[in-house]
Amino acid sequence: MDFFTNYSTKFIALTFAATLLLAGCSNPASDDDDHDDHTEPHSIEFVLNGETVVSFTDGNISGHFDVAKGDETALITANFYDEDGDEIHGEDLDDEYSLAWNIGNTDHADIEQHDEDGRWSFHIVGKQAGETTVQFLLQHGDDHADFETPAVDENDAIEIHVTDSSQ
């Protein structure tokens, strides 16, 4: 009888420990931790030649991009900020993140990102005089964006003004 009691006690203790271990490893909430480990951007600024030319903060756009037809802007760099206004440095965003964009009318302007520009910098190329809009996204993998500016078809989208190069 002592054999079965001793065996049962050990078996129950081992089963309980294994249950706790497995429950902790398969906790669905822990799967969300990978996504919550990074700081979510709250705003973005685009810097050209040391000056902020466009910013998107609290749902408001300030500024626009200018480029001449047939020209390419100097390097423009995207800087992300958290809710407290602290910069989220590019190295804080792992390789799963990238800068993406949608342009309303690529007949007027396009964006080029050269290998030497890095993940957070690009150039705007003026193709035809006029205006178009652009939406920027902080893409997280291939499945979603963690941050985005207003869509190209919204009234408050970021504008690109392309001037005639002869002006």
Image (cartoon, rainbow, N blue to C red):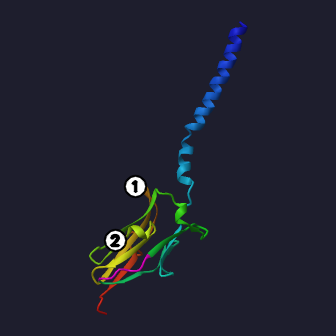
Which residue corresponds to mark 1? 142
Does the rendering let one see residue 30?
Answer: yes
Q: Secondary structure at mark 1?
A: loop
- The N terminus lies in quadrant: top right
Whole-percent x, y for residue 113 in the image:
38, 69
Which corner quadrant of the image does residue 158 belong to? Answer: bottom left
- Between residues 142 and 148, which one lies in front from this camera angle? 142
Q: Nearer the viewer, residue 9 or 52?
A: 52
* 49 relative to 105, above or below: below
Q: Which residues are magenta?
A: 70-75
Dot 1, crowdedness within 10 Å: few (<14), some or many (≥20)? few
- Identify the main secondary structure in magenta: loop
- 2 left or right of 108? right
Amino acid at circle 1: Asp
The residue sitting at 27% across, 81% down in the picture is: 128
The one of 152 and 106 positioned closer to us in this rendering: 106
Give the position of the C terminus as an image quadrant.
bottom left
Residue 73 in the image, given as x and y percentages of width and height: 38, 80
Is 105 situated above or below 38? below
Q: Secondary structure at mark 2?
A: strand
Q: At 73% across and 8% down in the image, what residue appears?
A: 2
- Which of the pair 89/36 is nearer the observer? 89
Residue 37 rendering spot, x and y as whole percentages: 57, 54
Whether residue 85 is in magenta: the answer is no
From the viewer's perspective, is residue 18 above or below residue 117? above
User: Reading the chain from its start, which is encountered first: label 2 or label 1?
Assistant: 2
For this orientation, the residue located farthest to the front is 116
Task: Give me the residue at 35% from left, 80% from top.
Answer: 72
User: Residue at the top extreme?
Assistant: 1
Disc marking residue 58: none
Answer whether residue 40 is visible to the viewer in this image.
Answer: no
Residue that numbered label 2 is attached to: 103
